[in-house]
Amino acid sequence: MLSWVYPVRIIQAILALATIAVTAYVIGTLYDSWSFSSLIYYMLFAGCWTTLIAVPYLGLAPVWLPRVSHEFVIPAVELITMAIWLSGWIALAVKIPKPAQCTYPSCHGLQATIVVAAVEWALFLFTNTYALLDVKNSRHNRKAREQRREQVSNANAEVSEANASETV
């Protein structure tokens, strides 16, 4: 595993916790339509998903549970998490008021949520790129190993045939 992956996973978990904190603040302080907005709860879900499921699985499964970390499951979890963050921050950015009209603290909390979610999406895009490259390389390496095994088995068969003809 690459040495930079674990610090990135820690940053992803910290940003997800920050999203949970800011969305909880927004839910607790806004008493209008925003306090019950499904977008706020969606961003809360994104933070919880990342903190409780995605980052622990992506960080620990390859080391502690290698049978559970299939080469296609890791990119799938990365892709799902990346899509969750992308859809969340774009939907929230479209819905909030313009910066000039955003004068109350909870609106600034919504802006902070958008920024943190966009950074989180970018981090998952970055790690997903490497996960997909790893899948591509592992498939290429598997084909090369199979070709080498086939060449070795053919060479062994020729040697055993040569030995059999010498003994006759």
Image (cartoon, rainbow, N blue to C red):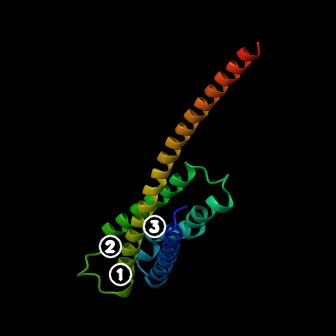
Q: Quadrant of residue 85?
A: bottom left
Q: Nearer the viewer, residue 6 or 36?
A: 6
Amino acid type at circle 3 is Ser
Q: Which residue is mark 2?
A: 96
User: What's the amino acid at mark 1?
Assistant: Cys
On the image, numbered disc 3 is attached to which residue? 38
Q: Residue at 55% x, 48% y: name it.
A: 72
Q: Residue at x 43, y 82 (%)?
A: 30
Please tell me how many numbered marks the rendered image carries: 3
Mark yes or no: residue 88 visible.
Answer: no
Q: Is residue 56 left or right of residue 26?
A: right
Is 143 located above or below residue 111 in the figure? Answer: above
| Residue farthest along the left direction in this orientation | 100
Q: Secondary structure at mark 3?
A: helix
User: For the residues marked 3 and 1, what is the alpha-carbon distance in whole angstroms?
Assistant: 16 Å
- Mark 3 vs mark 1: give the one in front: 1
> Is 22 on the left-hand or right-hand side of 66?
left
